[in-house]
Image (tube, grey):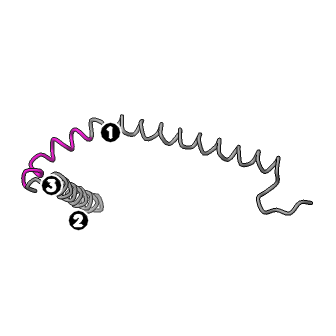
């Protein structure tokens, strides 16, 4: 067996394990039979893939927003230290 064949086999096994685990979680969350959820998985996966680009853009925007908020907090902390000294520091 070639390296490519072995790699593709591992990828297929990993993907199958993910799909089965996801179907199990959905089945438990929705209180539905596992077989029913498993039959719907191809449509669910297609739907997930169709929105993946939007989901990634939303996550990137949220990350940028969180970074900007943290940057502002750090700037405020630095300004406070410049004005009042570091917390717990003894005056010179």
**Closer to the observer: label 2 or label 1?**
1
Q: Which numbered tag is attached to residue 52?
A: 1
Query: Which residues lie in the magenta part?
Result: 35-48
For label 2, count other residues whose C-alpha is less than 10 Å away and answer few (under 14), some (14-19) or many (20+).
few
Residue at disc 1, secondary structure: helix
- Callouts 3 and 2 close, C-beta under 8 Å: no
Q: Residue visible at 9% across and 48% down? A: 39
> As drawn, which residue projects farthest toward the right?
92
Q: Is residue 77 left or right of residue 55?
A: right
The spot of residue 75 in percent (x, y) is 70, 44
Residue that mark 3 sits on: 27
Residue at disc 3, secondary structure: helix
Q: Residue visible at 67% across and 47% down? A: 74
Image-quadrant location for residue 28: bottom left
- Callouts 1 and 3 close, C-beta under 8 Å: no
Question: Is residue 90 shown above or below 48?
Answer: below
Looking at the picture, tell me which residue is in the foreground, 90 or 63.
90
Looking at the picture, tell me which residue is in the foreground, 27 or 83.
83
Q: Which numbered tag is attached to residue 20?
A: none
**Closer to the observer: label 3 or label 2?**
3
Q: Is tag 3's residue or tag 2's residue first in the polypeptide sequence? A: 2
Is the N terminus in the top left, top right, bottom left or bottom right quadrant? Answer: bottom left
The spot of residue 78 in percent (x, y) is 75, 48
For label 3, count other residues whose C-alpha is less than 10 Å away and answer few (under 14), some (14-19) or many (20+).
some
What's the distance in space between the residues labelled 1 and 3, CA to CA? 22 Å
Q: Residue visible at 82% across and 62% down? A: 89
Residue that mark 2 sits on: 1
Image-quadrant location for residue 43: top left
Residue at disc 2, secondary structure: loop
């Amino acid at each position: 067996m070639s390296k490519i064949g072995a790699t593709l086999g591992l990828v297929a096994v990993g993907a199958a394990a993910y799909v089965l685990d996801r179907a199990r979680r959905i089945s438990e969350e929705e209180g539905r039979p596992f077989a029913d959820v498993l039959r719907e998985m191809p449509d669910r996966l297609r739907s997930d893939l169709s929105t993946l680009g939007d989901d990634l853009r939303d996550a990137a925007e949220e990350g940028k927003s969180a970074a900007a908020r943290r940057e502002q907090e750090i700037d405020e902390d630095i300004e406070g230290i410049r004005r009042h000294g570091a917390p717990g520091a003894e005056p010179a």
